[in-house]
Image (cartoon, rainbow, N blue to C red):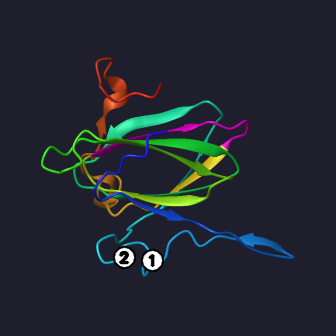
Amino acid sequence: MDNIIISGVFVKELPAHHDNRGWLIELYREDECNGQWHRPVMNYISQTLPGVIRGPHEHKYQTDYFAFVGPSNFDLYLWDARSKVETYQNKMVIRCGQDQPRAIIIPPGVVHAYKNVGDTPGWVFNAPDKLYAGYLKREPVDEIRHELDDQSPYYIE
């Protein structure tokens, strides 16, 4: 896995608080996750089947706040496509999910994709700071979908 840093990407471990009823993980806390500049306006959870890749894509304006807690594991791929940033063209790969619960803030211009590398369906929570397709879903979707381009430099091995 690559351990290269990308400017503006924030990775937070998500410890589970266990008791005799089970566990609890705080997915988002404004005071711990750069809350001054990331304010979620919606959230959703998705399920990804084993071996399935979502992305790569990027946003021009939206910041994503992903939380990977299980019940599977994922490899999250990040590529810095921002030519005016010192980490331009850097790549990161982060293992996250059941074995390493993590939250990751991904700023605009950072291409991202993830793959379920486990044996079971896995869940991904996202709390972006922009509404999907804008207010009442009446605006263009803020996505550049690199997975539709056979010549894209962004791919998962």
Asked which secondary structure carries label 1, the reply is: loop
> Which of the 4 image quadrants contains residue 30?
bottom left
Between marks 1 and 2 in the image, the one whose residue lies nearer the viewer: 1
Residue at the location (33% across, 17% down)?
150
Task: Indicate the position of residue 142 as horizontal and vertical percent values.
Answer: 27, 47
10 Å neighbourhood of mark 1: few (<14), some, or many (≥20)? few
Q: Which residue is mark 2?
A: 35
Q: CA distance from mark 1 to mark 2?
A: 7 Å
The residue that mark 1 highlights is 32
> Which segment is the magenta one?
110-121
Q: Nearer the viewer, residue 22 or 42?
A: 22
Where's residue 121, x and y in %?
A: 68, 41
Q: Quadrant of residue 11?
A: bottom left
Q: Please say whether residue 112 is one of the residues in the magenta stretch.
A: yes
In the image, taking residue 77 as reference, residue 142 lies left or right, namely: left
Q: Which mark is residue 5?
A: none
User: Looking at the picture, which amino acid does disc 1 mark?
Assistant: Glu
Residue drawn where x is 64% and y is 36% of the image: 49
Depth check: 107 or 127 in front?
Answer: 107
Q: Image height check: is 99 above or below 112?
A: below
**Residue 54 belongs to magenta span:** no
Left or right: where 146 falls relative to 68 = left
**Which residue: 31% across, 61% down?**
130
Residue visible at 32% across and 31% down in the picture: 146
Three-letter amino acid code at the position of disc 2 = Gly
Circles 1 and 2: CB atoms closer than 8 Å: yes
Location of residue 152 in the rendering, given as x and y in whole percent from the top left corner: 29, 24
Residue 28 location, x and y as percent? 50, 71
